[in-house]
Image (spheres, rainbow, N blue to C red):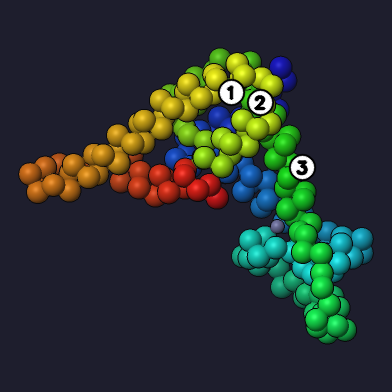
Amino acid sequence: MIKTQKYYDFMELFEQSDCPICLMRQKWAHEFIDAFLYEGVNDKQFRKIIRDNGGICRRHAYDMMEQGDPLAHAILYSDLIGDYLQNIDKKKKNGCLICSKEEEADKIMYRSFMTYFTQDTAFKQKFADTKSCICRPHLKELKAMFKKNKDMIDGLYAVQIENLKAVKTHLDEIVRKHDYRYAHEKLTDEESVAWKRAVKLMVGR
Ligand SMILES: [Zn+2]
Ligand SMILES: [Zn+2]
């Protein structure tokens, strides 16, 4: 097994409280958008795909706007609004260039994650020790992708279930410590972020 940069990135992301796959995907999208704003926006082929789609999806459009770059946006949106003005009611395909690239990148990322998880003891151990959790939508996607490798999925489920129980314990502690009888007990660092973490784990990003 070759340890690529992804291996080390995952190992680092396990230390954060959010789903490591969501975080890795955000990292990918950030880098892709950066490159797109820097040079992709001058690519006529890319711009034509975006025009034919009527733009990019809401999530990626906002991500891109937040990453800044007035010039790149002016080039892209002048093109889009020019096309829109030609026929305001024209139906578009409603696809998203970044979504389709993201889907391809996701598949490669899922494969790397599962390979490391099943073939590298240190990787699996760190996932267990840091109580990292995969969000519900990503777990479902991993299960669908590796449905023929039951052992792989069972191995992941075993650790994931233990880690999820730890999150539930934190949540139950928040509730307990809100009781006036225990109100003098302070929330731990993990407990104080557990409620937000729980939301993200159940719905994904
Ligand atoms: Zn996720
Ligand atoms: Zn999109």
Q: From mark 2 to mark 1, how far is it between C-alphas? A: 8 Å
Residue at the spot of label 1:
153
**Ligand 1 closer than 8 Å to label 2 CB:** no
Q: From mark 1 to mark 3, how far is it between C-alphas? A: 21 Å
Badge 1 density bin: few <14, some 14–19, many ≥20, Cα 10 Å? some
Task: Determine whether 121 is above or below 79 in the image.
Answer: above
Badge 2 density bin: few <14, some 14–19, many ≥20, Cα 10 Å? few
State how many labels appear: 3
> Residue 3 is drawn in which quadrant?
top right
Q: In this view of the protein, which residue sits in the foreground, 173 or 6? A: 173
Of pointers 3 and 2, the one earlier in the residue sequence: 3
Q: Amino acid at mark 2?
A: Lys
For the residues labelled 1 and 3, say whether their Cβ atoms are less than 8 Å apart.
no
Of tags 1 and 3, the one toward the viewer is: 1
* Residue drawn 81% across the image and 64% down it: 93
* Residue drawn 18% across the image and 44% down it: 177
* Residue drawn 40% across the image and 44% down it: 198
Horizontal and vertical percent position of residue 86: 88, 84
Of pointers 1 and 3, the one earlier in the residue sequence: 3
Residue at the spot of label 3:
104
Residue at the spot of label 2:
147
Residue 36 shows up from this direction:
no
Horizontal and vertical percent position of residue 72: 77, 69
Horizontal and vertical percent position of residue 167: 36, 36
